Image (tube, grey):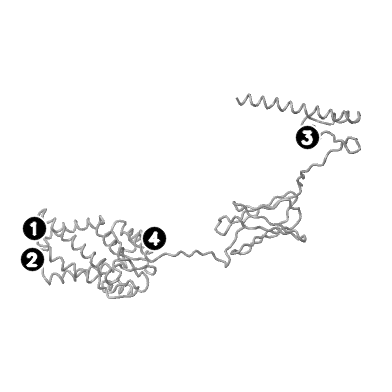
């Protein structure tokens, strides 16, 4: 089908050429014989002859034919004229369409404007060579932009680069508003990724202390449950139960039954402690159960901050307060253990003994957090 179409097109074109030549000859025969003999030899090829073909001579008002060619309505481009174009962007490289771009030259009253299109592009054409043109953009909210003088060579086309609009005032700033709840959710999400050596949970530490916001009640319970059900937490409970089994403490029986009892007791100790001291009491007393890493200052001040952490905490109002939540959680957990520990391991003395041990463990944990674990928590170093 393509071959047939090409042949038909060629035949049609040949017919048009012959018709045009015949019309030309008829027009020449109506004039003088000398003109008829002078036209055809001047045409070097049929295409040139067709380009020069004029419409049939029109009769003038005096009855004589006019052989002179009619003037063309299409202006012929001047090869010596040039153009200036460009693309409008902001300092971030984003397009700025729809702005008005002005062009001026020294000639009085010679002022042009164009509107940048949807692609932020603009162009001024038919510009004279040797004239110092200047392009400018003046948009509300932006600093006025003006190009240096552009002098075009004959037929030169210049594309302006770095047409960048700056925000008025010298700086571009974006203010993002978010509620403290949204910020707290994001901070907890980051903390839940903190692990010592890449696998040990280290969720209750705030490394960005200056920007920390208080936790909601929901987040306090969420963080407590997240730690309680973590696989590493469960693995540590089962491992500690094996150690307790070997040491035959508490006074449960040996064998699988005794191991199960020790797993339950150790798990219950940890769960009640973190639930009461990390969620219930902090919610009721409006205190933050997390450790706030200091990281700066003298070694003495950092040591004091770490060792006093079980006794001094940060309130939800940002002020330092007695750490009733932590102390109360340890004491409550020790008291509740009387419900499931063997009778030989119950009593007031054991309750306060367990409370003292728990407090000492928190002091040691604060020291480790302040001076050791920060460098071992790789996700914290990457994110803060």
For mark 2, does the 10 Å Cα neighbourhood hold few (<14), some (14 to 19), or many (20 or more) residues?
A: few
Q: Vertical placement of 108 versus 350: above or below?
A: above
Question: Quick one: SS at disc 1?
Answer: loop
Query: Which of marks 2 and 3 precedes in the sequence?
Result: 3
User: How far is disc 2 from disc 1 in space, using C-alphas?
Assistant: 12 Å
Viewer-nearest of labels 1 and 3? 3
User: How far is disc 1 from disc 3 in space, using C-alphas?
Assistant: 115 Å
User: How far is disc 4 from disc 3 in space, using C-alphas?
Assistant: 74 Å
Which residue does the image show at 60% across and 53% down from the upper left? 120
Query: Which of marks 4 and 1 precedes in the sequence?
Result: 1
Q: Which residue is mark 1?
A: 253
Which residue does the image show at 18% across and 67% down from the upper left? 333
350 or 111, which is in the foreground? 111
Question: Quick one: SS at disc 4?
Answer: helix
Question: Quick one: SS at disc 3?
Answer: helix
- From the top left corner, tell me how far across and down residue 259 is, in percent: 13, 56
Question: Quick one: SS at disc 2?
Answer: helix
Q: Which residue is mark 3?
A: 51
Query: Which of marks 2 and 4 precedes in the sequence?
Result: 2
Query: Which of marks 1 and 2 precedes in the sequence?
Result: 1
Viewer-nearest of labels 4 and 3? 3
Decide if residue 373 is on the left or right side of residue 87.
Answer: left
71 or 192, which is in the foreground? 71
Image disc number at residue 383 = 4
Q: Vertical placement of 242 versus 25: above or below?
A: below
Viewer-nearest of labels 3 and 2? 3
């Amino acid at each position: 089908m393509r071959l047939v179409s090409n042949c038909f097109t060629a035949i049609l074109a040949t017919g048009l050429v012959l018709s045009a030549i015949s019309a030309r000859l008829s027009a020449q025969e109506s004039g003088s014989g000398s003109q008829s003999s002078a036209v055809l030899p001047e045409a070097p090829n049929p295409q040139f002859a067709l380009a020069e073909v004029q419409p049939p001579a029109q009769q003038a008002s005096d009855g004589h034919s006019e052989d002179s060619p009619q003037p063309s309505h299409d202006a012929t481009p001047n090869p010596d004229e040039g153009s200036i174009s460009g693309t409008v962007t902001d300092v971030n490289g984003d397009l700025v369409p729809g702005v008005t771009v002005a062009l001026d030259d020294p000639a009085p009253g010679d002022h042009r404007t164009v509107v940048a299109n949807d692609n932020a592009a603009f162009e001024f054409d038919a510009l004279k060579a040797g004239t110092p043109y200047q392009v400018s953009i003046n948009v509300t909210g932006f600093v006025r932009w003006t190009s240096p003088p552009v002098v075009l060579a004959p037929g030169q086309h210049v594309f302006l680069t770095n047409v960048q609009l700056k925000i008025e005032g010298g700086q571009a700033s974006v203010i993002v508003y978010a509620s403290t709840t949204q910020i707290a959710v994001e901070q907890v999400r980051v903390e839940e990724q903190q692990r010592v050596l890449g696998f040990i949970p280290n969720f209750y530490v705030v490394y960005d202390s200056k920007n920390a916001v208080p936790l909601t009640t929901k987040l306090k319970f969420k963080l407590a449950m997240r730690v309680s059900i973590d696989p590493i937490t469960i693995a540590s409970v089962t491992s500690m139960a094996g150690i307790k089994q070997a040491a035959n403490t508490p006074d449960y029986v040996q064998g699988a039954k005794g191991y199960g009892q020790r797993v339950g007791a150790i798990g219950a100790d940890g769960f009640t402690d973190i639930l009461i001291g990390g969620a219930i009491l902090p919610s009721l007393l409006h205190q933050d159960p997390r450790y706030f890493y200091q990281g700066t200052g003298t070694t003495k001040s950092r040591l004091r901050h770490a060792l006093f952490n079980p006794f001094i905490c940060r309130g939800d109002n940002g002020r330092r307060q007695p750490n009733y939540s932590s102390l109360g959680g340890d004491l409550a957990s020790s008291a509740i253990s009387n419900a499931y520990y063997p009778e030989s391991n119950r009593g007031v003395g054991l309750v306060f003994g367990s409370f003292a041990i728990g407090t000492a463990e928190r002091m040691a944990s604060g020291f480790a957090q302040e001076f050791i674990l920060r460098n071992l928590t790789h996700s914290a170093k990457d994110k803060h």
